[in-house]
Amino acid sequence: MSETKLTNTSQPNSIAQVADVLLAGGVALVPTDTVYGIFVRGKEGRKKLLSVKPRSNDKPISFLVPNGSDLSGVVEISKLGYELIEKHWPGGLTIVFSKVKQPPDEYMVETFGGDDPAFGGNTLGVRCPNHEWLLELLEITGPIAGTSANVSGQKTPLEIKDLDEQIRQSVDIICDGGALSDTASTVVDLTADSLKILRQGFVLVYQSH
């Protein structure tokens, strides 16, 4: 594997650098509004992500989107879902939706992983982040799949200097965004009739929302 490229969010060309890596099927480690994450785009990228950080099917990988319109025709959004999007996006809330019965196949497989259980199977966990640099990146790349930049079972590092060496060497580019939070996004499940909190995190959400 070639040497990992390094950049930071204050560099004018950092978004273009990271976008080039993602659009070429590479793996990028970047800051978000919650914790550092490892992200990829497309089918080839998703294969690499699972080799960098393997996941069991009961802990599927979620997606970041530049806005809620990318979900049109892909997931079933209830009235409550629209209310949560309006209230908490962009922000630290990941929402798990049911995928529509007949999504656009090529788009679904290429962008959101089709029915791959590692990427949700019949569900889709998705979030629009409240991070200007990252939103500009997403406008170029479209939706990207990702997970926190830690070894499974260990704390996510607050700064790039604290990254696990194996993680550091497994990605194609690292973008330093300074010291971040150690709190991941809140995750809620809207695949049933009512809201279920899967993880209470960055955004405080109640069962009644």
Image (cartoon, rainbow, N blue to C red):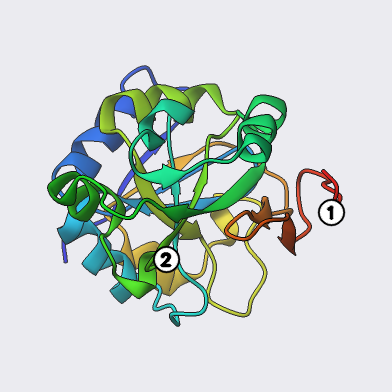
Residue found 29% across the figure and 75% down from its top: 51
Q: Is residue 2 left or right of residue 84?
A: left
Residue found 75% across the figure and 60% down from its top: 197
Q: Quadrant of the C terminus?
A: top right
Query: Dot 2: what SS?
Result: loop
Q: Which residue is mark 1?
A: 207
Give the label on residue 27, or none. none
Q: Is residue 14 left or right of residue 57?
A: left
Identify which residue, 49 or 113, lies in the foreground.
Answer: 113
Residue 162: image quadrant is bottom right
Residue 67: percent from left, percent from top: 46, 27
Residue found 31% across the figure and 59% down from its top: 171
Q: Nearer the viewer, mark 1 or mark 2?
A: 1
Q: Is residue 134 shown above or below 25?
A: above
Do the CB atoms of the residues marked 1 and 2 lie less than 8 Å apart? no
Q: Which residue is mark 2?
A: 120
> Is residue 168 in sight in this rendering?
yes
Q: Amino acid at mark 1?
A: Gln
Residue 69: percent from left, percent from top: 41, 26
Q: Amino acid at mark 2?
A: Gly
Q: Earlier in the sequence, mark 1 or mark 2?
A: 2
Query: Dot 1: what SS?
Result: loop
Residue lying farthest top?
12
Q: Is residue 31 shown above or below 14?
A: below
Q: CA distance from mark 1 to mark 2?
A: 22 Å
Q: Is residue 45 left or right of residue 119?
A: left
Residue 188: image quadrant is bottom right
> Is residue 67 in sight in this rendering?
no
Residue 167: percent from left, percent from top: 42, 68
Residue found 22% across the figure and 57% down from its top: 45
